[in-house]
Amino acid sequence: MGLIGVTGATGHVGGRVARRLAAGGAPQRLVVRDAARAPALPGAEVAVATYADAGSLVEAFTGVDVLLLVSAAEDADRVRQHHNAVEAAAAAGVRRVVYTSFLGAAPDCTFTFGRDHAATERFLADAGLEATVLRNSFYLDVLPEFVTDGVLRGPAGDGRLAAVAREDVADAALAALLDDRHAGRTYDLTGPESTTLAEVAAELTRAGGTEVRYVDETVEEAYASRASSGAPRWMLDGWVSTYTAIASGELDVVSGAVEELTGHPPLGLREVLAQR
């Protein structure tokens, strides 16, 4: 295998993958927006590019054999940014792409940001690139950040999800990057068990020693409670549909893919909270 390209190397998942690659001595190029923020890793090259600048991406990807394409931050223009990245990978001659998608990605999925991922998966196919698609559930690590003033609120009802740890996503991405047998495959990456948000709140209470309550809002209440943020409508839609996607049952999936890819079982919420 030749040079591995890692986008999002300053972020939670890309950074973890880059450190794992460096520890294993794999040649890699870190593709970052700001070279000053790139992690200093032995044997790693650094290239500066943004998903908004197609030309910079082609230059950054040239010479890369296998690319980790970490999805961009939520943005009204994210679909175009991802299209830039996929087209640049094809133009640069990248042989295979490992893409961090979302569980249940589809043009009409309830989670509005998941639709961006469906579009990107289509771009990869249309570009003729070999791809390994990692469809991640929501991150276990982020669930505590949904709590405000001791309340986890949203219109999720009694829906269930099996959120996944970032550590496990990074381990899975590493395995996918290093083994061509994963080309052309799509993996659902989840945690070990499916839980309601009420159960998540109870676990957060146990771990933190301070009560966390789950409040099941209506959709209208959810928009109203978030309106004061001043966020644009597309962002509010994404925030609210985080919960309605859980309520719909679309995220009630428990997969064995983390263990299949990594050789170890996925972390659960209790283990992730213990590491904080």
Image (tube, rainbow, N blue to C red):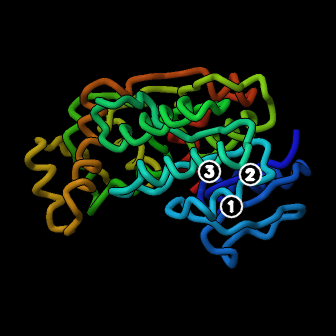
The N terminus lies in quadrant? top right
Residue beneath the point at 87% across and 52% down: 27
Q: Are marks 3 and 1 in contact (CB under 8 Å)?
A: no
- The three-letter amino acid code for the residue at tag 1 is Val
Compared across the picture, whether 28 is left or right of 123 comes to right
Compared across the picture, whether 6 is left or right of 25 comes to left
Crowdedness near tag 2: few (<14), some (14–19) or many (≥20) residues, C-alpha within 10 Å: many
The C terminus lies in quadrant? bottom right
Label tally: 3
Secondary element at tag 3: helix
The part of the image, by quadrant, that contains residue 30 is: bottom right
- The three-letter amino acid code for the residue at tag 2 is Gly
**Residue 181, image x and y in percent?**
77, 22
Compared across the picture, whether 52 is left or right of 89 comes to left
Crowdedness near tag 3: few (<14), some (14–19) or many (≥20) residues, C-alpha within 10 Å: many
C-alpha span from label 3 to label 1: 13 Å
The answer to whether one can see residue 191 in this image is: no
Residue beneath the point at 57% across and 45% down: 86
Give me the disc on residue 5: 2
The answer to whether one can see residue 220 in this image is: yes
Secondary element at tag 1: strand
Q: Mark 1 or mark 2, which has the lower sequence index? A: 2
Where is mark 1, residue-wise? 31
The part of the image, by quadrant, that contains residue 50 is: bottom right
Q: Which residue lies furthest to the bottom in this view?
A: 36
**Residue 267, image x and y in percent?**
60, 36
Where is mark 3, residue-wise? 88
Picture layout, residue 81 above or below residue 65: below
Q: Are marks 1 and 2 in contact (CB under 8 Å)?
A: yes
